[in-house]
Image: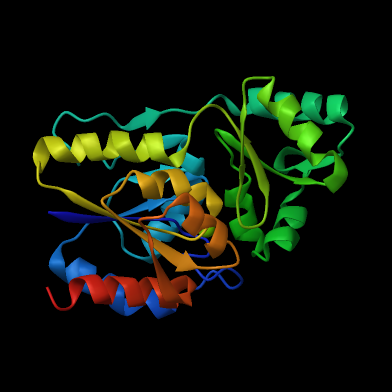
Amino acid sequence: MRLVITDLDGTLLDHDTYSFAEAQPALDLLSRLGVPVIFASSKTRAEILMWRRLMDNRHPFISENGGAVFYPPGYFPDGPEADIFGDPYPELVRALEEASEESGCPVTGFARMSVQDVARECGMTPAMARLARQRECDEPFLAHDQDRLDALLSAIASRGKRYTRGGRFHHITGKHDKAAAVRKLLERFRVVAPDVVAIGLGDGLNDAQFLNAVDIPILIRSASTEKLKAAVPRGSVTRETGPRGWREAILELFVQT
Ligand SMILES: [Mg+2]
């Protein structure tokens, strides 16, 4: 059994417009073949629930860079509703503010941004921004002094927190990542389907670890491709970017087989 685990922003969704229209033929194909498509994103549970509805997706998903895996009721026999890996959100917000003060690197996290600020920074509608602000275990932030960024990162690490870089924001999280969440999810799939083959698609450096944890890693072309390829040497790189690249990769893998 094959399954697809995919990043959203810059991968299945266009980096600028958030459209997945170009990937629709590939999504339709996977749905006809009964291949589960699992979203693994830095987005919140509230946002991913919206995208799942828009794409008519009924599968488990990974939110906030691996902070949690959520399962639809009854998806796995006797399975839990969720596997939670992340640290509580208020703890992250506090750690970021302390690290900012200690390093002298001014930051602006989502907690201090209004719905309008988030909408503007992310090019989202206010309704989408409202969902994006419902954080549970990952705080995205902007850093305003590039010279002090290294000091900020050390101050984050010294508080036992982790740092990742997404397409638009820096992120502070607990000691979780997409890879651990993907491994847990694959473990649950293997109980019901021991022959599972996982195909992973991502475009950013925060996808590197999870792409190394799947059987077939695919790197969607982006500004980060060179660095990502160095981190995921097994990965094949698409010619196209975003949802066009997604379609290209899925059609190549699934059409002739
Ligand atoms: Mg991405």
Seen at 38% across and 75% down, the residue is: 23
Q: Is 249 placed left or right of 219 in the picture?
A: left
Farthest-out residue, right? 104
x and y percent of residue 159 in the render? Answer: 68, 19
x and y percent of residue 131 in the render? Answer: 57, 50
Q: Which of 126 and 166 is in front in this view?
A: 166
Q: Quadrant of residue 251?
A: bottom left
Count of numbered tags: 0
Q: Quadrant of residue 54?
A: bottom left
Q: Nearer the viewer, residue 236 or 186?
A: 236
x and y percent of residue 226 in the render? Answer: 55, 62
Q: Is 50 placed left or right of 16 in the picture?
A: left
Q: Which of 22 and 56 is in front in this view?
A: 22
Q: Quadrant of the N terminus?
A: bottom left
Look at the image and tell me whether residue 120 can be seen: yes
Farthest-out residue, top? 159
Q: Which of 255 and 232 is in front in this view?
A: 232
Seen at 59% across and 42% down, the residue is: 134
Look at the image and tell me whether residue 20 can be seen: no
Q: In which quarter of the image is residue 122?
A: bottom right
Q: In which quarter of the image is the C terminus?
A: bottom left
Seen at 78% across and 27% down, the residue is: 99
- State the scheme by which the image is colored: rainbow
Seen at 19% across and 60% down, the residue is: 35
x and y percent of residue 234 in the render? Answer: 35, 56
Against 48, residue 106 (above or below) is above
